[in-house]
Amino acid sequence: MSLRDFVLANYPLLAAVGAFTGLATFVSNNALGLPWLATYLRFLFVAGAALLALELTAQWPPELRLDRVRVPTGTPWRLAAFAYGAQLAMLGALLNVYWQYPRLLLPTLFLAIGALLWQIVVPQRAKVWPGTWVLVAVIALLVAELVFTLLWQERTVLDWLWGQVR
């Protein structure tokens, strides 16, 4: 497989990753007059780009993933350079967004805690009950808020909501 063949076979994925990354980069800090909305729009765009980049990584031949040490002989150097460059660029884009906007760690932590609770803590028989996922989401949000508040001393979403209620 050459680089040209790979790009022709996967150009919709490449374009979508680029679009989501570009949208995440250029979302205004004051989206629609609501500063907190920009944070969550960035999160959604970065999450979309990351999911598409993972799908793109699955399209590579297994020997061209970053966790492999050597490129096998006979692989075109352009394809190998593009594969490693694209994977490193997506990793760098993710780290850059989290570095510039640490507030995005809250929804990421929320999703991670929710997924872990759903997979590990919730028994199989309880997963079919109505409302179980809502309870898991609420618990995951509260735990994420607690961890985030302890690690980062600025106001969190619950602080903002409490200010709106009062």
Image (cartoon, rainbow, N blue to C red):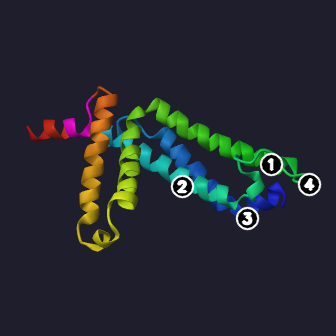
Per the model, the C-alpha gap separating discs 4 and 1 is 11 Å
Disc 3, SS: helix
The earlier-in-sequence mark between 3 and 1 is 3
Give the residue drawn at x 29%, y 63%. 133
Residue 9, numbered circle: 3
Vertical comparison of 99 with 25: above or below: above
Check disc 2: other Cα within 10 Å, few if <14, some if 14-19, many if 20+.
Answer: few
Disc 4, SS: loop
Q: Position of residue 72 (x, y in %)?
A: 86, 52
Name the residue type under label 3.
Answer: Ala
The earlier-in-sequence mark between 4 and 3 is 3
Name the residue type under label 2.
Answer: Leu
Magenta part of the chain: 155-159
Disc 1, SS: helix
Per the model, the C-alpha gap separating discs 2 and 3 is 18 Å
Q: Nearer the viewer, mark 2 or mark 4?
A: 4
The residue at which mark 1 appears reads as 80
Relative depth, front residue between 151 and 162: 151
Contact (Cβ within 8 Å) of mark 2 with mark 1? no
The residue at which mark 4 appears reads as 74
Q: Position of residue 146 (x, y in %)?
A: 27, 38
Name the residue type under label 1.
Answer: Ala
Per the model, the C-alpha gap separating discs 4 and 3 is 20 Å
Q: Is residue 34 visible?
A: no
Relative depth, front residue between 67 and 18: 67
Vertical comparison of 51 with 123: above or below: above
Per the model, the C-alpha gap separating discs 2 and 1 is 21 Å
Horizontally, residue 42 falls left or right of residue 70, namely left
The earlier-in-sequence mark between 2 and 4 is 2
Horizontally, residue 159 falls left or right of residue 36, namely left
